[in-house]
Amino acid sequence: MVSLRRSTWGLLVLLIVPFFTHAQLLTGLERPLDVSMTPQYPAAGEEVRLSVSSYGLDLDRSAIIWYADGKEIARNTTETKVTAGKLGSLINITVVAEETDGLIGSGSARIRPTEVDLIWSSDSYAPPYFKGRKLAGSSARIRAEALVRFTRADGTMIPSNEIIYTWHRGTTRILQGRGRSSVEFAGPALFSSEEVTVSAQSTDGAYVGRASVRISGVDPTLELYENHPLFGVLYHRALTGSVVTAEKEQRVTAVPYFAHVSTPEEKALSYSWSVAGGPVRPNPDEPQNLTVTSNGYAGPARIELDLTSASDLFLKARGSWELVFSESALFSGSGSDDPFARPE
């Protein structure tokens, strides 16, 4: 009987010891490691810097191993680098750390390259064939659009209606929803700027991307162009500095870049022209145009323009140009009742 009892007690000890060891191992694996990526949303082929941190483990006193898709890539370092694959490909990152006393922690990350472009434009004015972006002039409205390329493993693209878009203006969320790839909002105040951000995520959460842009409010600017009698306004060549002309009559057109108008002829706009220091009343039907006539005078004539708007109190644009005639001249504006003579 005594022998049987001793054997039974020994068996119980053997059963308890393995269970305790396994429970201790599980407790160690529950220590989380935080893995961060820079950039957070990498593009295809971009180098990604990975770093690990932890509040539960002393990483300086731990053995650390990094894995990419199960293959060891670095050891005993809190940072490493991985090159992202092609668009839509996936690299699974795992890092394991073990302290000298046996405590264990692990963390993971996924590197799946995506592409998100954020484009924007305003409803401010720009002349025909203008190839640049319409900047955010005073009182303008902005339209932003996200171009998202989420590529599946088979090479197909995830359609926009399977992507959830979240739009922020600064820290304020202004729109969120499935397929909401564009948004419209009031532009920033004059001389201020705002950051607009869009985050895109596939409905299954497997693909994530983000893009942001800073939009600045700008003061509308005035440019002056020759208005040719045969070819019309020569938008490809703005008049800058001193412009010499041998013509007896020079017709010019002012373009209010990025003013919040649909056309330069809008009645709310007020064009205040002056030539050689004297005011010239513009043609009410074409206030953006001015005709300067030569009559025997040779020399420079300063053309100045102030532009304001009755519907936009923030619109105040000013331009100044010099037109040099090669012979004696008198100056008159289109629609003037009395020609304006250059003072002696």
Image: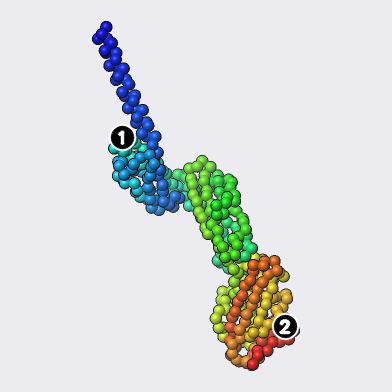
Q: Position of residue 251 (x, y in %)?
A: 64, 81
Query: Is residue 287 placed above or below 32 in the rendered structure?
Result: below
Which three-letter amino acid code belongs to the residue tagged 1? Gly
How far is the residue under mark 1 from the one under mark 2?
A: 94 Å
In the image: residue 192, left or right of residue 343: left
Name the spot of residue 144 as percent of width and height, x first. Answer: 57, 56
| Label 2 packing within 10 angstroms: few (<14), some (14-19), many (20+) | few
Q: Is residue 29 above or below residue 38?
A: above
Quadrant assignment for the C terminus? bottom right
> Is residue 295 at least partly visible in the picture?
yes
Label 1 belongs to which residue?
A: 102
Pointer 2 residue: 336
Whichever of labels 1 and 2 marks the residue nearer the N terminus, that label is 1
Amino acid at the residue labelled 2: Ser
Q: Is residue 87 visible in this depiction of the protein?
A: no
Image coordinates for residue 229, horizontal then vertical, percent: 65, 80
Pinpoint residue 21: horizontal percent, then vertical percent: 32, 27
Q: Please identify the quadrant where the N terminus is shown.
A: top left
Q: Mark 2: which secondary structure?
A: loop
